[in-house]
């Protein structure tokens, strides 16, 4: 037996691999998570993820790959779930500065920008219709937080039948331990955990094909 019991019993037995028609999903890169003046905005792993995601998005747009870019916000406490996170309960409302899109990772002229109300970008949003319209078979999931909204989005992406790719350096969390633990776990079950460089190489192939 090895040190990895899950591997010993068959988890992570194969790589999913990229498909032919990618779509990019950017989860919750809004100022409440990406700008240091906000309570949850000072996480180094998230800032690293923003920088790497910006590079991937530049390549995706150049390759004419569809991009869905979401933020979390509510109209009032009445339509907010029972979050246990104080800054979300206090500030994540439409019109609040923390609900603004991160400018380094959003392009209103290109991206499909949508609001979500649950952890997953898929939950009660039109994102599946958007991906279907573009014939997407592969999702590239980026954003924050790895242990929460990224994990939920990855599981839903898998559940809807997409090849799901997560570039490790394009997702972030408040703590490296749950970041690593959750990536390792979804990588055993639902997704390929890859690097941004590998995604960039793949997007370059797509760009050349689309020329």
Image (tube, rainbow, N blue to C red):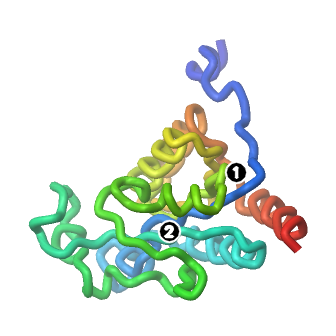
Rendering coords of residue 35 (x, y %): 42, 82
Measure the C-alpha gap from mark 1 to mark 2. Answer: 17 Å
Q: Residues within 10 Å of mark 2 (few under 14, many from 20)?
A: many
Using the image, determine if residue 56 lies above or below residue 129: below
The quadrant of the picture occupied by the N terminus is top right
Left or right for 12, reference 77: right
| Mark 2, residue position | 46
Q: Is residue 86 visible?
A: yes
Query: For the image shown, how many numbered marks are present on the structure?
Result: 2
Q: Vertical placement of 59 versus 201: above or below?
A: below
Q: Residue furthest front?
A: 133
Local SS, label 2: helix
For residue 196, which quarter of the picture? bottom right
| Residue in front for this viewpoint, 132 or 9 | 132
Residue 152 x, y percent position in the rendering: 42, 48
Front in this rendered view, residue 110 or 187: 110
The residue that disc 1 covers is 194
Quarter of the image that includes the C terminus: bottom right
Asked if residue 3 shows in the view, the reply is no
Q: What residue is rendered at 59% in x and 70% in y?
A: 67
Label of residue 7 in the image? none
């Amino acid at each position: 037996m090895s040190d990895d019991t899950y591997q010993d019993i068959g988890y992570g037995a194969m790589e999913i691999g990229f498909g032919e028609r990618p779509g990019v999903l950017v989860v919750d890169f809004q100022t409440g998570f990406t700008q240091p003046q906000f309570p949850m905005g000072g996480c180094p792993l998230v800032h690293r993820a923003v920088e790497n995601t910006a590079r991937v998005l530049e390549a995706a747009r150049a390759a004419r790959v569809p991009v869905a870019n979401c933020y979390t916000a509510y109209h009032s406490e009445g339509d907010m779930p029972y979050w246990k996170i104080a800054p979300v309960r206090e500030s994540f409302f439409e019109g609040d500065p923390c609900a603004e899109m991160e400018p380094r990772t959003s392009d209103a002229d290109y991206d499909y920008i949508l609001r979500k109300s649950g952890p997953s970008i898929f939950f009660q949003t039109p994102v599946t219709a958007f991906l279907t319209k573009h014939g997407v078979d592969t999702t590239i999931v980026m954003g924050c937080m790895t242990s929460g909204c990224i994990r939920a989005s990855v599981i839903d992406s898998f559940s809807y039948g997409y090849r799901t790719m997560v570039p490790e350096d394009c997702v972030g969390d408040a703590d490296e331990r749950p970041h690593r633990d959750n990536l390792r776990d979804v990588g055993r079950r639902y997704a390929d955990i890859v690097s941004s460089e590998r995604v960039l190489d793949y997007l370059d192939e797509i760009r050349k094909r689309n020329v």
